Image (spheres, helix red, strand yellow):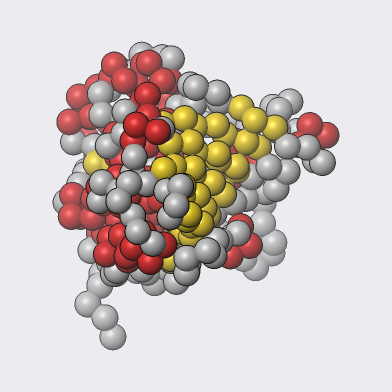
Amino acid sequence: MNNYSTCSVGVVGFRGYSGAELVRILSRHPYVETVLLEHRADSEPRTGPLGRKIPKEVPATAEAIQAEKLDLVFLATPAEVSIDLAPPILAAGAKVVDLSGAFRLGDAETYSRWYRERHTAPALFDEAVYGLPEFYRDRIRSARLVANPGCYPTAANLALRPLVSAQVVDRTRGIICDAKSGVSGAGRKPSLKTSFCEVTENFSAYGFNDHRHVPEVLQNSGLGEREFTFTAHLLPLHRGILESIYLRTQGVKSAVDLLSVYEDHYADEPFIRLYAPGKVPDLRAVQGTNFCDIGFQFDSESQRATVVVAEDNLVKGAAGQAVQNMNLMLGFPETEALL
C-alpha cells in the first residue's frame, strides 16, 4: 500500500523523440494516468500493435485540459509552440514542465539574443524555475512552471558547477567544452543535416560561438561568456551525449581532492554516478537511463583536468529529467519510474 493518489498528466508533442520517451517512461509510473494532447490539426493518427493499450488522445486546448482534470502538462514542443501553449494551460489550472528553451533564460532580452526571435509571454519568466533538481530541488517542488534544462547544459552544469562553486577552477585560463550528441538531439523534424546519408560514417561540428545552450551553462554555473568556449558535434548515433571539458585547476594537490569536491556536492544524489580518479564514463553506461556519469583525468603538476561527463540526451537530457521534475512537483518519490 502507498499514500499516493493517482494524477492525470498530459503530453503535448508525443510524436517527437522526447515526447515518445516521455510516454514510454510514464507508462511504467504507478501513480500517473497519461493523456495525449494533440496540438497539430494535420497530424496523422497514431498506430500501434493490436492489443496494446494506447493512452487517450484529446486536443491540446484549455477546455480539454479542464475536462480531463489534468494535474500537469508536459510540453515536448519547439520553443515558439511552448510560448503559445503555456499561458492557457496554466490558466486552466495545470502545472507545466516545458522541455523547450522557452523559459530557461530568465528574461525576454536574453531569449531574443540567443533564439533570434521575440518572446511573447515574458511575464512567465518571473515564475519559471530551471528544472535541474540537483541544484534547484526545493524551488521545483513548489513551482507551477518548470523549464526543463537542455541536454548539453545538463551535462555541462553537473560537471562544472561543483568545481566553480568550490573555487578550484583557474577561471583566468578559460574552460573548453567539447560536446558530442546523437542525432535524436536535433529532434524529429526532417532536415538535410540529420538525414541518413549525411550522418552515417560522418562526424561534424556545429554551433560555433552562438549555440543557444551556452547561456544555460553560464547562468547556472556562474561563469562569464569570456571564460567558456563550447562546440557541439553530431555523432552518427541515435542517442547519448558525451562531453569532454578541459580546464586548469588551482590549489588542488591530488586527484582525490578533486573527487572529494564532487562527492561533497553529490553525496545524496540518486542520478549522479562518480568514477574513481583516472576513470571516465562512456555512452554505453548511460544509454536508456536517467543517470549522469562523471569522471576525470588530473595532472597535479600542470593543474590540468579533463572532466568527461555522459548522459542519455533523451532521458536525463530531456524526458527522464522532466519526469524527475514532475515527481517533485506532484509529491511523488523523485526516482519513481526512473530506476
Kindly identify the residue that appears in the image at 37 percent across and 29 percent down. Answer: 227
Kindly identify the residue that appears in the image at 69 percent across and 61 percent down. Answer: 49
Quadrant (top left, top right, bottom left, bottom right) of the N terminus: bottom left
Q: From this viewpoint, is residue 108 visible? A: yes
Count of residue discs:
0
Kindly identify the residue that appears in the image at 27 percent across and 64 percent down. Answer: 264
Residue 170 point in image, percent of width and height: 34, 40
Q: In the displayed structure, would residue 211 be above or below residue 175?
A: above
- In the picture, measured across the screen, residue 331 lies left or right of residue 210, that is left
Q: From this viewpoint, is residue 319 visible? A: no
- In the picture, measured across the screen, residue 177 lies left or right of residue 174, that is right
Check the image and name the residue furthest to the bottom: 1
- In the picture, measured across the screen, residue 107 lies left or right of residue 297, that is left
Depth order, front residue of 292/90:
292
Check the image and name the residue furthest to the front: 301
Residue 277 point in image, percent of width and height: 47, 65
Residue 163 point in image, percent of width and height: 32, 50
Kindly identify the residue that appears in the image at 25 percent across and 72 percent down. Answer: 4
Q: In the displayed structure, would residue 30 be above or below residue 93?
A: below
Depth order, front residue of 138/59:
138
Residue 34 point in image, percent of width and height: 43, 57
Depth order, front residue of 83/273:
273
- In the picture, measured across the screen, residue 6 lies left or right of residue 152, that is left
Quadrant (top left, top right, bottom left, bottom right) of the C terminus: bottom left
